[in-house]
Image (cartoon, rainbow, N blue to C red):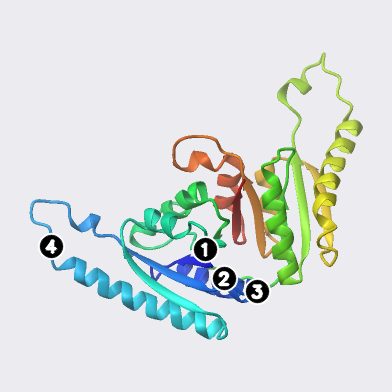
Amino acid sequence: MIIVGVDGSVTSRAAVEWAANDAFRMRVPLRIVHAVDRSPYQIGKYPNVALPDVLLSEGRRILREAEALARERQPAIEVETHNIEGAPAVVLREQAKGATELVVGSRGLGGFAGALLGSVSMHVAGHVHCPVVVVRGELRPVHGEVVAGVDDSPECEPALAYAFEQAKLRGSALRVVHAWQLPVHAFASEAAVDMDEVRTTQHQLVRDRVAALSKDYPEVRVIEEALSAHPVDALTDASERANLLVVGSHGRGALGSMLLGSVSRGVLHHARCPVAVVRA
């Protein structure tokens, strides 16, 4: 099942369209979830007891509109809606347990709001174990390409597998990007670095990662890139011509977005297309 969080914002509408299309491609049901967050209205000496009823009613309206949009986009899919009380991030984390995919807008209203990237989007991308797709609200042309970022860690393998599957379902090419930078000590005068050897090693790394999966996806055309550049810059550039950018999550911190890792956080902020974060 695919879960999509909605709050009535432009980006959540885009998330519903994305989720409906993915549900159709994957042949799985779609669950549309709205979180009714009472907490901002229960602060103070005299909280407004009538507000929760208003919030529930507004949530039902948002869900009706989201369901209509999903059915208009993909009439054949199975759709259900849930109006759940609780903080949006907590509600979505619970709903995502056992899900095929969780889809959210990059920014939203109320509890979904944030400065550059919505706090809820950042939170669920760092904590949810299923793939999380963060969708922006801008209309984009169909480029026919999925981009996946890879490195030399085993954590990137689930992200690459997800990217292959998405490329297959969409009939798209898959661009596999490995961006690397020399460590600082390599620039010291006493350090001799064979750039050709480094470049060859990086290209072989990409080929090995791809070869392990491409035999299962013979219909997917793969484009391999090994670049000497910062990973966020390279992936942001690649997102200009992509309909989906897929990254793994390598963060190991204990607090919020630190679970994402710096590259995942960077592309979530700067990518031009929807971003899927796939945790190992």
What amino acid type should be assigned to the residue bearing mark 4?
A: Asn
Compared with 131, 259 (above or below) is: above
* CA distance separating discs 1 and 4: 32 Å
* CA distance separating discs 2 and 1: 8 Å
List the residue tagged with mark 4: 48
**Where residue 188 appears, x then y in whole percent?**
77, 17
User: What residue is shown at x 48% (from left), y 81% (from top)?
Assistant: 69
Which mark identifies residue 18? Answer: 2
Q: Are marks 3 and 2 in contact (CB under 8 Å)?
A: no
Which comes before the other along the chain, label 2 or label 1? 2
- In the rendered view, does 233 fall on the left or right side of 174? left
Mark 1 or mark 4, whichever is nearer to me:
1
| SS at mark 3 in the image | helix
* CA distance separating discs 3 and 1: 15 Å
Q: Are marks 2 and 1 in contact (CB under 8 Å)?
A: yes
Displayed quadrant of residue 184: top right
Compared with 66, 193 (above or below) is: above
Which comes before the other along the chain, label 4 or label 3? 3
List the residue tagged with mark 3: 25
* CA distance separating discs 4 and 2: 36 Å
Q: Label 4: few (<14), some or many (≥20) within 10 Å? A: few
Which mark identifies residue 103? Answer: 1
Q: Are marks 4 and 3 in contact (CB under 8 Å)?
A: no
Displayed quadrant of residue 226: top right
Q: Label 1: few (<14), some or many (≥20) within 10 Å? A: many
| SS at mark 1 in the image | strand
